[in-house]
Image (spheres, helix red, strand yellow):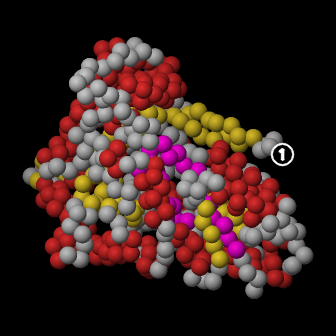
């Protein structure tokens, strides 16, 4: 069997907030490990960590160093990813080796028809990629060995691709072929999400050094934030099973398998083992559970007990910090037909070392929570407030995820959500708002004709083939419709203003302030001067309170003009 060399690349990500976005792509390193233990050489290139290496890898491809070049693509960076894949395809044309260009990840699985319209991509891997990528390598190696003079992938498609599950491609007649993934079983899930984690290596230290070089922990520990460069992300579930209207995550496995499937989660004991492993091997000071919804209450109670015992015995550092994404209703219990805060769970989480819970709140409007584009039917506004207040009461640090311009929103609902969010920010909450609602392939909203959205256009340099890319939802309200495309630009102007008039620096503007900058922009664009001034005062209060004002004696705000 001929040797196969694989290059895997991550999508280019925005690193304007380094302490949030600069982190290794665990999925790519899992693939690399899976290939390595099966005697296949694989390199990983992260253009965000090492942008200067892109030219090096392009040169290596042009010299025939790699047989398979793959990218973990994303919808938000689709234009950049398409351009980069086109560069790698051009590089393969100067190589003496026959090479495959492939793509994978959630975006690839949920939007494979669009991506396969690009002539630079040979095939898409659906669902979890370990097994199909390994099979692809083995079949391609055999093909190259049997056909050393082959100059195109046409005959490989004819003879081999129909044998591989979990892939999609266009055959030689330009007909779409989809080989869906087998149904994920618990043993394979545990092998991928648990067993493999103990035998793979991820270069966390390279990322941690880059984060520390980009900024200081003093800057990033702003507004009650507890930032540690030595943070590790863990995934402990197969996929989310909720049906939020704007989210594509729950469709990932069902689309790959072409059928409904149950969510699988690791046990409390297994998650505890992973925490022990990552603190022992890498020296992690912080663990972020990046599942869309980590806090299964029953598992979480048991997990917290295990962590507490390990900290008390000295098996884990007592100051290890835990953070997770979750839903408001995970912290509610029903007693005598009344919904109350689950204080037992919240206090146990606090004792175990949890600090920040990122909550998918999205809006403070009961009507919008139930509208199809949001579809958060598990709780109401008063319950959101109960949970936020309870977390603040025990000195936890909840982070409020928001979508400001929900397509169904009225001006009154938008203003109310901004006011309530600002109120909780001033109480000490974190804030992570999205100005506009992204349209992601696979999200329920894409199947709802009552919602309209904008698109971007990308054209292939050689073929002039045009690709239309779903962008953002168009708001229904006529006044909001007039201003929604301007919000990001005006918020950027506000950000620039604060950078010029304070000690804030571009590498470390905290998300609560970034959120309030968006509030200021929206109020300005809607002509609500009093509301704009109120948000400006709140932003300056935070700046002064955190010691980022230029003149320590000056607590007034410079006059702001756009």
State whether residue 305 appears in this view: no
Q: Is residue 539 left or right of residue 18?
A: left
Q: Residue placed at 20% from the left, 50% from the top? A: 396
Residue at figure coordinates x 88%, y 73% from the top left: 150
Region of the chain picked out in magenta, as a range: 5-28
Identify the residue at the far right of this view. 149
Up-down relation of residue 339 to residue 372 (above or below): below
Horizontal and vertical percent position of residue 336? 9, 52
Image quadrant containing the N terminus: bottom right
| Membership of 16 in magenta stretch | yes
At mark 1, the secondary structure is: loop
Residue at the image position 49 percent from the left and 51 percent from the top = 248
Farthest residue in the bottom direction? 1
Could you tell me residue 425's position as x and y percent? 26, 36
Quarter of the figure with residue 146: bottom right
Q: Is residue 311 magenta?
A: no
* Left or right position of 357 against 116: left
């Amino acid at each position: 069997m001929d040797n196969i060399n694989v290059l895997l690349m991550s999508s280019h990500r925005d690193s304007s907030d380094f302490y949030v976005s600069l982190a290794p792509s665990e999925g790519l390193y899992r693939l690399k490990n899976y290939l390595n233990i099966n005697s296949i050489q694989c390199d990983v290139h992260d253009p965000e960590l090492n942008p200067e290496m892109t030219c090096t890898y392009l040169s290596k491809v042009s010299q025939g160093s790699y047989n398979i070049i793959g990218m973990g693509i994303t919808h938000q960076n689709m234009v950049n990813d398409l351009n980069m894949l086109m560069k790698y395809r051009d590089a393969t044309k100067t190589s003496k080796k026959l090479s495959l260009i492939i793509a994978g990840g959630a975006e690839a699985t949920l939007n494979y028809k669009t991506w396969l319209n690009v002539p630079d991509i040979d095939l898409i891997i659906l669902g979890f990629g370990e097994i199909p990528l390994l099979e692809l390598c083995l079949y391609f190696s055999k093909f190259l060995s049997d056909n050393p003079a082959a100059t195109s992938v046409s005959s490989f498609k004819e003879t081999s691709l129909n044998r591989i599950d979990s892939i999609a491609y266009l055959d030689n007649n330009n007909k779409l072929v989809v080989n869906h993934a087998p149904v994920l079983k618990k043993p394979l899930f545990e092998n991928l999400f648990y067993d493999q984690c103990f035998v793979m290596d991820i270069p966390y230290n390279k990322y941690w050094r880059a984060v520390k070089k980009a900024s200081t922990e003093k800057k990033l520990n702003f507004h009650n934030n507890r930032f540690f460069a030595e943070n590790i992300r863990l995934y402990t579930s197969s996929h989310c099973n909720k049906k939020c209207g704007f989210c594509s995550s729950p469709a990932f496995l069902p689309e790959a398998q072409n059928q409904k499937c149950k969510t699988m989660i690791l046990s409390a004991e297994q998650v505890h083992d992973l925490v022990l492993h990552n603190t022992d091997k890498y020296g992690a000071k912080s663990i972020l559970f990046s599942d869309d919804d980590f806090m299964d209450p029953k598992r979480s109670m048991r997990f917290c007990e295990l962590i507490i015992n390990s900290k008390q015995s000295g098996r884990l550092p007592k100051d290890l910090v835990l953070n997770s994404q979750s839903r408001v209703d995970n912290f509610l219990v029903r007693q005598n037909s009344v919904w109350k805060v689950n204080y037992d769970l919240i206090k146990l989480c606090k004792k175990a070392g949890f600090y920040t819970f990122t909550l998918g709140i999205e809006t403070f409007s009961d009507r919008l929570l139930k509208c199809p584009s949001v579809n958060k039917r598990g709780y109401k506004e008063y319950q959101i407030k109960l949970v936020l207040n309870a977390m603040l009461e025990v000195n936890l640090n909840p982070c409020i995820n928001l979508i400001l311009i929900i397509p169904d929103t009225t001006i009154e609902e938008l203003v109310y959500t901004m006011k309530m969010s600002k109120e909780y920010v001033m109480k000490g909450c974190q804030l992570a708002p999205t100005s506009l609602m992204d349209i992601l392939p696979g999200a329920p909203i894409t199947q709802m004709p009552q919602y309209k959205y904008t698109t971007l256009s990308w054209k292939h340099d050689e073929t002039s083939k045009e690709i239309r890319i779903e962008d953002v939802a168009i708001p229904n309200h006529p006044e909001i419709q007039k201003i929604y495309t301007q919000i990001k630009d005006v918020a950027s102007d506000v950000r620039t203003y604060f950078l010029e008039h304070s000690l804030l620096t571009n590498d470390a503007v905290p998300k609560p302030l970034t959120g309030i900058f968006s509030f200021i922009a929206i109020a300005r664009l809607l002509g609500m001067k009093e509301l704009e001034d109120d948000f400006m005062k709140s932003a300056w209060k935070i700046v002064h309170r955190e010691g980022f004002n230029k003149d320590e004696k000056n607590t007034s705000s410079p006059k702001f003009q756009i």
